Image: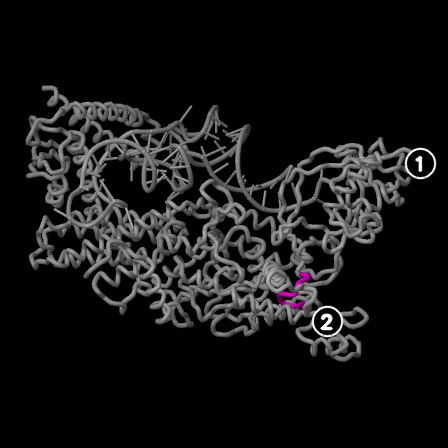
Amino acid sequence: MELSKNFMPAAAESRWTTIWKDRKYFNSVPDERPAFAVVIPPPNVTGVLHMGHTLNETVQDILVRKARMSGFNACWVPGSDHASIATEAKVVQMLEKEKGIKKADLTRPEFLRYAFEWKEKYGGIIYSQIERLGCSVDWNRVTFTMDDHYYKAVIDVFVDLHDKGLIYRGARMINWDPAAKTALSDEEVEYKEVQGKLYYIRYKLEKGGDIIIATQRPETIMGDTAICVNPNDDRYRALIGSHAYVPLIDRKIPVIADEYVDPAFGTGALKVTPAHDINDYNLGLKHGLDVIDTLNDDGTLSEAAIIHVGTDRFKARKLIVAELEEKGLLAKEETYQTRVGYSQRTGVVVEPKISTQWFLRMKDMAGPALEAVLSGNVRIHPGDKFLATYRYWMENVKDWCISRQLWWGQQIPAWYNKDGGYVVAADRETAVIRFREKGVELQAEDIRQDEDVLDTWFSSWLWPMEVFNGITDPGNKDIDYYYPTSVLVTGQDIIFFWVARMIMAGMEYKKEKPFSDVYFTGMVRDKQGRKMSKSLGNSPDLLELIDKYGADAVRFGIMISSPAGNDLLFDEASLEQGRFFNNKMWNALKLIGMWKEKQSTEKPVDDWAHEWFEARLLQARLEVEQLLSQFRLSEALKTIYSLIWDDFCSWYLEWIKPGFEEAMASESLQKAVGFYEELLQLLHPFMPFITEEIFSLLRQRGNDEVLCIRQFPALASQREKLQQLTVQQRLEEGQLLQAVISGLRDARNKAQLKPKEQVALFITPANRELYNNICLILQKQVNASAISFTTEAVAKSLTVVIGKDQFYLQAGRETAPVQQKEDLLKELEYLKGFLVSVEKKLGNERFVQNAKPEVVETEKRKQEDARAKIRLIEESLTELTT
RNA sequence: GGGAGCAUAGCUCAGCUGGUUCAGAGCAGCUGCCUUACAAGCAGCGGGUCCGCGGUUCGAAUCCGUGUGCUCCCACCA
């Protein structure tokens, strides 16, 4: 077997990707096994995977692979989201740039044709990245949120909710995105603290004089329809009921009173602009004020503004401020810290705007969705962090604006006649019937469909159901088998957009939660803690990382530094660590390969080492199980990493390694190979490629037997085994052996004994029996010519105390005991202090009375141990000084 | 303004139900080694006022209160 010097990820990755795919290991159909279903949070179809996705997909793959190897019928459904606003914006941009076509010049079908072309061209990138990362998804189940069946499901749900009275149409104040020219939901607005300005503007009063009003938005004054003061504010009481003039356009407006106004803020007088501010809108409703909308859909001033018509809102602000100043109407300006809402998708400042849109009543749907989480039916990880947030949102949920003024998405199934009357129906024919039911006689060509589409999230909230056709074909085999899914892995930033709404939809349409566990990953930041973003240029390209380090190393790096639920500071150094780990495992394969070439049939002498490693593996395996069940993936990986690197490579392989040019006992070799296979299996969910590769090379299995479907041993039997006395004893012996080897090597180092210089070793053990099995290995590992047991101090030797035992190293030459004496004195000092504290504890009556008996027992043991060790060290010191 | 979380080694973090020599791991650092799997490595080492203060307890990194600092979410003061 000729092996390359290092592990070459690229070749192994493409080889195993093909094998897995060709043999359909990851395709799932319902059978008699329990299901373990995971639906991927569908990434934006035209996007690329960023580090956040990489983390999420890796976590999901670990859970899915683990389940598949543990008796479950694992099914991971891949797919993508049409991402209405984002995709439409990209297509519009592409059309203008590459083809010089404006959206306005296209018909709806023409535009959609371009959009689908675009989706076909770029939509595949996401999938190829998911594949390169090694994700074990079922490619037969790829779902897109605009697939025919999915489209139908969304329409059906809309019609159903409308028929139930949960969806309504009306004019409300909504968030308007002037760049995308569409309404947004509250969740799509991101508020940021910005340094703004507060302008103090003079409004002339009808009765003479003026009143000064503070505003952040002078460009909206033309929409003012009142000035409002607090009725209890003595400064303004006399003005209530009088009139003032809007500056620059001199429109007459009343001064009204409302307790809402805070006399302490600004000047205590508020300009009321019902069309452009939610509070003003509410005030307007209360006081019956006019609504003057001075902005167009694209954020320029409208005819109603009278001045600066057609000018952009921010340019108009500057012009108006300048004009006010010139006319002496600007009393003062001050800087002011404020919050401004930005569109999550386009990044522009959102305008509050009154608009006729479709809304979903959320209150009734929130009840069951809240209950599902509070009762523990859906478990959130890490729970303590998100439970309160979830609860608050559900209890204070507002109606959801679900219509968007776009073309890319599911078109709203509402139909209007010429009089503006409308019905909701899945298609034109049904719509005509519904009109007739209402007594409106008309023909199919007399009605037109609503131009708008539905919010993307109004389709994604059906994801766990409709990927299995649960809405369009309820009761089918798949939905009955896979639903509810097992775990949802996603970023905490979409808890309201998506997670909460999926639970709502699941409770509404399946009367059952969509998933049992939700695992929130943190945000991926760079190593300085900054958010990853395109503008900062700190977001690495996934494929480049895979090319550089290999997919396994990328997965390792991102998982090892990813504490559950916390943000992850991405640092390429951890990927490097992953690559080093690859090579470590590769080298272990090479070592075993060398052993194969020179074997003997003799009975091996190292039975103990095999028994020890078996015990250690058992222990670690159960630890990993425990950690995985708690979603502590990072720690599970650390445990396996250390098991392979330290326990297997550094200890076990060294312990069974034959002497120079000696043959390896076949029986030992087989044991080592067997252990290595188990380690690879344990690691496989985390690092699938290299584990398959080494597994296939270890016994030259070829490709017939693979790790990805190899089943883990049953847990119960493992737990029992670990409790066995001999297993526990091996573990204890192993710990002792490791401590003694390290301690003696340290002593040798400090005495400047070269590794090649042999020593004679004398031991005064506390428990002689523990040494029965480990002497041979100990002798080899510390390069001792012989080991003897003694009860007396050995003259002219290095003295070392390790644990409860005393060691004497006799070298072939004189060594300086200076450092050694210092070490012993230090140790002695510490022990004496320790003994004092233990004895104080034991001398405390209340401790002895109140503490649990076993705690008192251990304290007594500690006391005895400490005394014994102090005696040993003191003996050694006398020995040294004589 | 309301709520949640966090503060442990130079960095990133474990430390679960208070008690094992409990103060840990990885990375970084230092020392010595090109030793026949691996220098992408081996052997070994050093490093901490567990944020401050107070309380509960026989006993606190751990529980409670409080202060400080940081992070996030929510909220209609122009």
Q: Position of residue A150 (x, y in %)?
A: 56, 70
The reply to whether discs 1 and 2 touch (Cβ–Cβ < 8 Å) is no
The spot of residue A718 in percent (x, y) is 27, 56
Q: Is residue A82 above or below residue B45?
A: below
Q: Residue at x 66, y 47 (%)?
A: A341
Displayed quadrant of residue A201? top right
Query: Which residue position is annotated with label 2?
Result: A415
- Where residue A297 appears, as percent x and y from the top left, is 73, 56
Res A67 → quadrant:
bottom left
Under mark 2, the amino acid is Trp
Picture residue at 6% right of the left edge, 26% below the top: A795
> Between marks 1 and 2, how big is the CA–CA gap?
53 Å
Which residue: 58% across, 62% down? Answer: A505
How was this image coloured?
one colour
Label annotation for residue A684:
none
Answer few, some or many: residues within 10 Å of disc 1's Cα (few below 14, many 20 plus, some between 14 and 19): few
Give the farthest residue toward the right. Answer: A207
In the rendered structure, the answer to whether residue A561 lies left or right of residue A337 reads left
**Position of A525 compared to A253: left or right?**
left
Query: Please, what is the dominant secondary structure of the magenta stretch?
Result: loop
Q: Secondary structure at mark 2?
A: strand
Q: Amino acid at mark 1?
A: Lys
Circle 1: element type: loop
Residue at 59% in and 62% down: A98
Visible in this render: residue A357?
A: yes
- Quarter of the picture containing the C terminus of chain A is top left
Q: What is the span of residues highlighted in magenta in the rendered image?
A: A403-412
Can you give x and y, in whole percent of width and height, for residue A568 in the image? 45, 46
N-terminal of the two: label 1 or label 2? 1
